[in-house]
Amino acid sequence: MKLLTAFFVLSLFANVSWLGDFKEATAEASKTHKLILISFSGSDWCGPCIRERKEILENATFENYAADHLVLLRADFPRQKKNQLSKEQTQRNEALADKYNPEGKFPYTLLVDEHGKVLTTWDGFPNVSPENFVQQIASFASNGN
């Protein structure tokens, strides 16, 4: 009975995964006709980035919406040695930053279409509820990009 209850509880949570490769994200978005949410983050040093992740991006409202409507792409730039990314991932993140975040803003979140065209951006912590954040994204999805 406990196992069944645990399975039920876990099934209530959306299964979302964050990609780290823009080519993979655009291929997935093209295949599924979803928009791509790109999050530039300093996961171990940027207070507003940590807050955005905890309060919005890891909130059930956002995750439930994202599971069905978005391809998620994170470009993380950690500073602590213990959190360093692979050389390949660092290069992918830097290339993505060159294209979409040349000023090095953190946090910086973008909504792009399957071709990489920027639809909207959030510069800094999006000071809205997870529900409002999802509504903002949904307005672009319902407009047919």
Image: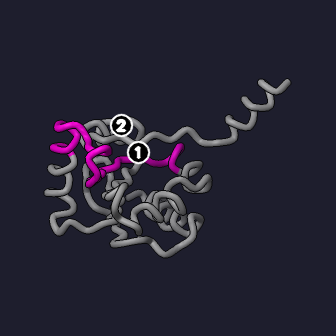
Q: Which residue in the structure is indicated by mark 2? A: 28
Left or right for 125, reference 76: right
Q: In the picture, which quadrant includes the N terminus?
A: top right
Question: Residue 71, labelled with which disc?
Answer: 1
Residue type pointed to by label 1: Val
Look at the numbered discs 1 and 2 and tell me whether their residues touch, using CB distance below 8 Å: yes
Image-quadrant location for residue 31 = top left
Q: In this view of the protein, which residue sits in the foreground, 62 or 113?
A: 62
Q: Which residues are magenta?
A: 66-92
Question: Residue 82, labelled with which disc?
Answer: none
Q: Within 10 angstroms of label 2, few (less than 14), some, or many (20 or more) residues?
A: some
Query: What is the x, y in percent for residue 108?
Result: 32, 65
Magenta stretch: residue 24 in it?
no
Query: What is the x, y in percent for residue 99?
Result: 16, 57
Q: In the picture, which quadrant includes the C terminus?
A: bottom left
Q: Residue at x 53, y 44 (%)?
A: 68
Residue type pointed to by label 2: Glu
Q: In this view of the protein, which residue sits in the foreground, 134 or 42?
A: 42
The colour scheme used here is one colour
Query: With respect to residue 5, does 84 lie above or below?
Result: below
Q: Residue at x 35, y 62 (%)?
A: 109
Q: Residue at x 32, y 58 (%)?
A: 42
